């Protein structure tokens, strides 16, 4: 990829990838390739998750007990390792989402163009 | 916690995880390729693009492993494999390093296990730190021997007084070591302890069976009860469960068994086989040791203050009286301190000594590492050039050194097991054990039977091993970490970095200094021991067998008549011994040199109040001949003295000096103020060192048994001078005694040589131990010197070759190397001598007849070391001299 391409792609905040993966798995079990495709598509290719970061993240989440994995045959008749959200993973996702909303709100407040005080 | 658990699980199921990961990445690749195929790529393009999109599978796998948390372990395993490969690559290096470290670690482990058992571990009693002894420091002016003394003995009157006054002690007990003949199937001699009944409560010990003594059992008449040790109950009574309430005969008197102590209870030591109550008052008894227990919540200091006050009160002093300088008159010491305090300085010396040995071993191995590091510089430079961080290389080197140290530690534990056995054997005396052990004085290393390699020792060794590994690994590693720029130079010129050479020289000089300190210490102790062993004892101990027949031999009535009968019995035994083939002389005495329990009977005065006192000994007619003592003036005891109502005495030279100003006293009459002694002096014998070779002879008076009026209840020691092997006549002796009295026991059998050998056991073990350490240090330092010089020669082969080529003679080359070697040796020697002069003061208490700065030892040791250093330097020098200039120039 070119330097321009790389610069346009967004660097993920620390820990955000974990949240994105959990979010993706919300709709059902998915394999590694599928997860990276979903994230890529939904972000309109602004975020590209490479295998070198995706798989360590998946294995880390599995170590934490937030996802579980099993080998299954895909609809295209391929053997693939599918990850699914565990109960603890769902809780973690909810926690991450609310943290994320807080963060977004805070950033939005800081990044406001004028110095108006909201609600004060 | 669960995290660690997961990691461990990950490590354990490692293989499966790896396989799974590979499958997963493969499936990713396959699916991606298939999708690309479906989107219209050619099969080849699809595969290539999918590969490209996946990126480096190796790096992905590495990152995933990181997520598993096993990466650190992976790297460690990798380093370990590498370390083992390195070790296998040069077996001589590895073996030398392991043996050297094994020696250092082993010696330290052995000494630690000794220090741990003797000094560190608490005594095996509950709350043993609250058990104390009352120690009295007697100033020289008041002491019997004329020198300042320390005693733990207290008179029974003082004991009772003290017990009624103390508010800080919750219990006090007097104790007396005794031995009694028990007649069960056969007559056996058992050793035991007479104690105040309070003792068991103070020690918080519950009997395994029955009960402990009741308080009123210290009253005479109620005291005929006995508690047996677990071992005695098993061994003598076959563990009879009905033993309680049974009567046993001890010295022919009936005692009721009231209790059995638990197996692990041993007071004062594991040789104690029974306990009797000590009934007060004990007539004629001068003093006994007292053991006391601090009241809960009372500190040792508070109790000691009270003890000092009670002591002053008992001596009739008020607290206003001026305190004499020196140690306090009354001291409280914990039981442990009282037991092991004496040996502490010696153990400290040994700890320092073994630390030196370990340091020297570390330096040697570090030097080996440095020598090899010089050879490995290329490899390390390449690794660093390839991007290995300094920390990564350092860790690799440390892993290597720790693996070596661990191997050394394992070798060391083996060595330590042998070493502690050696130490215990030394401490118990190396005398023949086919004869029975004696109640010896000077056999002074306490708690020796507790010495063992236990868990805490192994933990210590592990710690030591890791520290050692880091210590000797860090020196070369540090050097390498710094040496990158020099390394580049090395690659070009093939010479060693200069700083490295300086470090190695400095380490060698340090090593030599430490070795010198050890050698001098060992030299002093060995000289001290030799002095002790060669001290003239005043008698001839060779070919003399001694034994004791404890009395009263059971069926004798009490009183003066008993003494007569006892004497008659002893006379008869001596007469029959005399008839044995090979016997030159046979005699008996109540006061055998260097035997415990022979000093309680002592003290004679000569009339006027000012005269000094001395020891009194009862000896039979042939005693002087049997012991090989020299008669200086007059005559010995003779047949004509028998039946003569007038007693006759002999004095020793010291008594003549003390009481007669050296004038021949033969023919003079002696009498004491109590009218106990009255008779004529008929002879003078030479002095003997009665209390051991390190104690000056004291005044002694000898009398024959016939005129010995007091009731003496302990029996006699017999002395047989024989031309045969003493052990060979032992059966005859037993049968003689058995014929005369089947209930009499032949006890404490030993040759006089053994008795003496045992009395110098402690100095001998000190000398042997430090000698061993010094020898190890010398060997290590010699190897170090030799190795360094060999390396020096090898390194300068080219230079030497050029020198030879341009006309240097063999002598010049040898001189060059020798100068280098001896230069380092002399530097080390000088530092070592200076260090010794300072450190040897700590050795003072262990020396006898040798000054801590003994010039002879200092000179002799320096000479010996220089000789060894010369040899260690000469061999590499010779090697240098044989360098062929042609070959040398082609070298490298």
Image (spheres, coloured by chain):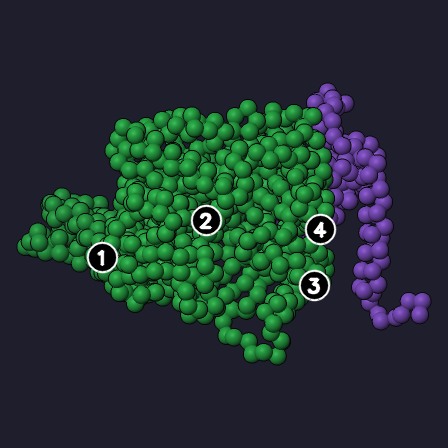
Mark 3–mark 2 distance (CA, rounded to whole Å) = 39 Å
Mark toward the viewer: 4 or 2: 2
* Residue bearing mark 2: B709
Q: Chain of mark 4?
A: A
- Callouts 1 and 2 on one subunit: yes
Quadrant location of the N terminus of chain A? top right
* Residue bearing mark 4: A14
The residue lying at 55 percent from left, 56 percent from top is: B287
The residue lying at 62 percent from left, 76 percent from top is: B319
Q: Colour of chain A?
A: purple
Mark 1–mark 3 distance (CA, rounded to whole Å) = 59 Å
Q: Label 4 neighbourhood size at 10 Å, few (<14), some (14-19), many (20+)?
A: few
Percent position of residue B278, x then y: 63, 47
Residue B637 visible in rendering: yes
* Label 1: which secondary element: helix
Sequence order check: which comes first, mark 1 or mark 2?
2
In this picture, residue B324 sits left or right of residue B11: left
* Label 3: which secondary element: helix
* Residue bearing mark 3: B165
Mark 4–mark 1 distance (CA, rounded to whole Å) = 74 Å
Along the viewing direction, whichever of B463 and B877 lies nearer the viewer? B463
Q: Colour of chain B?
A: green
Q: Label 1 neighbourhood size at 10 Å, few (<14), some (14-19), many (20+)?
A: few
Q: Chain of mark 3?
A: B
Mark toward the viewer: 3 or 4: 3
Along the viewing direction, whichever of B368 and A58 lies nearer the viewer? B368
Q: Are marks 3 and 4 in contact (CB under 8 Å)?
A: no
Residue B860: mark in rendering: 1
Sequence order check: which comes first, mark 1 or mark 3?
3
Mark 3–mark 4 distance (CA, rounded to whole Å) = 78 Å
Q: Label 2 neighbourhood size at 10 Å, few (<14), some (14-19), many (20+)?
A: some
């Amino acid at each position: 990829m070119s330097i321009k391409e790389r610069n346009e792609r967004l660097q993920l905040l620390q820990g955000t990838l974990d949240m994105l993966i959990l979010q993706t798995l919300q709709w059902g079990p998915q394999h590694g390739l599928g997860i990276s495709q979903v994230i890529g598509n939904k972000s309109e290719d602004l975020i590209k998750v490479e295998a070198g970061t995706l798989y360590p993240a998946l294995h880390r989440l599995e170590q934490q007990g937030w996802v579980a994995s099993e080998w299954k045959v895909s609809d295209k008749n391929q053997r693939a390792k599918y990850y699914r959200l565990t109960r603890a993973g769902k809780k973690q996702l909810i926690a991450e989402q609310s943290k994320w909303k807080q963060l977004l709100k805070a950033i939005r407040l800081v990044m406001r163009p004028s110095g108006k005080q909201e609600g004060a | 916690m669960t995290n660690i658990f997961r990691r461990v699980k990950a490590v354990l199921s490692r293989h499966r995880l790896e396989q799974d990961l590979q499958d997963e990445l493969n499936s990713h690749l396959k699916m991606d390729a298939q999708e690309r195929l479906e989107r219209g790529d050619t099969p080849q393009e699809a595969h290539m693009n999918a590969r490209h999109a996946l990126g480096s599978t190796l790096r992905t796998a590495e990152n995933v492993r990181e997520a598993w948390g096993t990466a650190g372990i992976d790297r460690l395993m990798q380093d370990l494999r590498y370390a083992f490969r390195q070790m296998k690559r040069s077996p001589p290096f590895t073996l030398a390093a392991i043996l050297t470290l094994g020696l250092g670690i082993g010696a330290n482990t052995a000494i630690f296990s000794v220090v741990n058992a003797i000094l560190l571990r608490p005594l095996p009693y509950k709350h043993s730190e609250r058990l104390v002894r009352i120690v009295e420091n007697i100033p020289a002016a008041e002491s019997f021997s004329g020198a300042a003394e320390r005693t733990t003995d207290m008179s029974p009157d003082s004991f009772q007084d003290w017990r009624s006054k103390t508010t800080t002690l919750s219990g006090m007990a007097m104790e007396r070591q005794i031995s009694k003949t028990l007649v069960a199937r056969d007559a056996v001699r058992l050793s035991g302890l007479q104690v105040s009944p309070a003792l068991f409560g103070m020690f918080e010990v519950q009997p395994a069976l029955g009960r402990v003594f009741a308080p009123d059992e210290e009253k005479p008449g109620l005291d005929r009860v006995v508690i047996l040790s677990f071992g005695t109950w098993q061994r003598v009574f076959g563990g009879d469960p009905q033993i309680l309430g049974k009567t046993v005969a001890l010295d022919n008197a009936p005692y009721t068994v009231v209790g059995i102590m638990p197996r692990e209870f041993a007071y004062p030591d594991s040789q104690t086989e029974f306990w009797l109550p000590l009934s007060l008052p004990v007539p004629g008894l001068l003093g006994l040791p007292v053991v006391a227990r601090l009241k809960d919540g009372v500190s040792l200091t508070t109790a000691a203050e009270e003890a000092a006050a009670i002591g002053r009160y008992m001596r009739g002093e008020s607290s206003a009286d001026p305190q004499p300088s020196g140690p306090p008159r009354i001291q409280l010491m914990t039981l442990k301190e009282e037991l092991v305090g004496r040996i502490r300085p010696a153990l400290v010396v040994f700890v320092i000594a073994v630390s030196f040995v370990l340091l020297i071993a570390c330096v040697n191995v570090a030097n080996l590492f440095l020598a090899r590091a010089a050879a490995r510089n290329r490899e390390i430079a390449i690794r660093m050039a390839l991007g290995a961080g300094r920390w990564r290389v350092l860790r690799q080197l440390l892993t290597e050194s720790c693996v070596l140290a661990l191997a050394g530690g394992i070798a060391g534990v083996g060595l330590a097991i042998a070493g502690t056995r050696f130490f215990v054997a030394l401490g118990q005396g190396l005398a023949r054990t086919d004869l029975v052990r004696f109640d010896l004085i000077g056999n002074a290393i306490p708690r020796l039977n507790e010495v063992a390699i236990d868990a805490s020792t192994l933990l210590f060794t592990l710690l030591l091993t890791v520290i050692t590994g880091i210590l000797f690994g860090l020196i070369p590693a540090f050097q390498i970490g710094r040496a990158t720029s020099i390394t580049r130079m090395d690659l070009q010129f093939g010479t060693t970095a200069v700083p490295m050479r300086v470090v190695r020289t400095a380490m060698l000089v340090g090593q030599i200094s430490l070795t010198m300190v050890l050698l001098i210490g060992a030299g002093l102790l060995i000289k001290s021991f030799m002095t002790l062993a060669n001290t003239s004892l005043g008698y001839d101990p060779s070919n003399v067998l001694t034994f004791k027949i404890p009395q009263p031999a059971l069926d004798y009535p009490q009183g003066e008549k008993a003494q007569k009968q006892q004497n008659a019995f002893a006379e008869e035994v001596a007469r029959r011994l005399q008839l044995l083939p090979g016997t030159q002389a046979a005699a008996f005495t109540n006061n055998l040199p260097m035997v415990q329990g022979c000093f309680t009977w002592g003290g004679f005065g000569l009339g006027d109040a000012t005269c000094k006192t001395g020891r009194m000994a009862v000896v039979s007619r042939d005693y002087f001949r049997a012991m090989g003592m020299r008669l200086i003036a007059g005559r010995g005891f003779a047949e004509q003295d028998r039946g003569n109502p007038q007693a006759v005495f002999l004095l020793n030279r010291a008594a003549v000096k003390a009481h007669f100003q050296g004038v021949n006293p033969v023919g003079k009459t002696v009498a004491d103020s109590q009218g106990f002694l009255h008779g004529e002096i008929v002879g003078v014998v030479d002095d003997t060192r009665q209390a051991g070779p390190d104690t000056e002879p004291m005044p002694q008076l000898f009398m024959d048994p016939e005129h010995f009026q007091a009731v003496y209840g302990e029996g006699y020691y017999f002395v047989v001078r024989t031309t045969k092997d003493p052990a060979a006549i032992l059966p005859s002796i037993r049968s003689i005694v058995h014929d005369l009295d089947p209930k009499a026991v032949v006890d404490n059998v030993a040759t006089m040589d053994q008795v003496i050998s045992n009395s110098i056991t402690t100095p001998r073990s000190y000398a042997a131990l430090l000698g061993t350490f010094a020898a190890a240090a010398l060997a290590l330092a010699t190897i170090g010197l030799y190795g360094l010089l060999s390396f020096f020669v090898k390194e300068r082969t080219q230079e030497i070759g050029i020198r030879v080529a341009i006309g240097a003679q063999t002598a010049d080359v040898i001189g060059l190397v020798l100068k280098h070697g001896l230069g380092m040796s002399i530097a080390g020697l000088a530092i070592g001598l200076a260090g010794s002069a300072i450190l040897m003061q700590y050795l003072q208490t262990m020396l006898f007849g040798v000054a801590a700065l003994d010039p002879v030892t200092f000179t002799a040791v320096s000479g010996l070391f220089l000789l060894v250093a010369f040899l260690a330097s000469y061999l590499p020098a010779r090697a240098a001299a044989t360098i062929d200039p042609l070959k040398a120039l082609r070298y490298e």
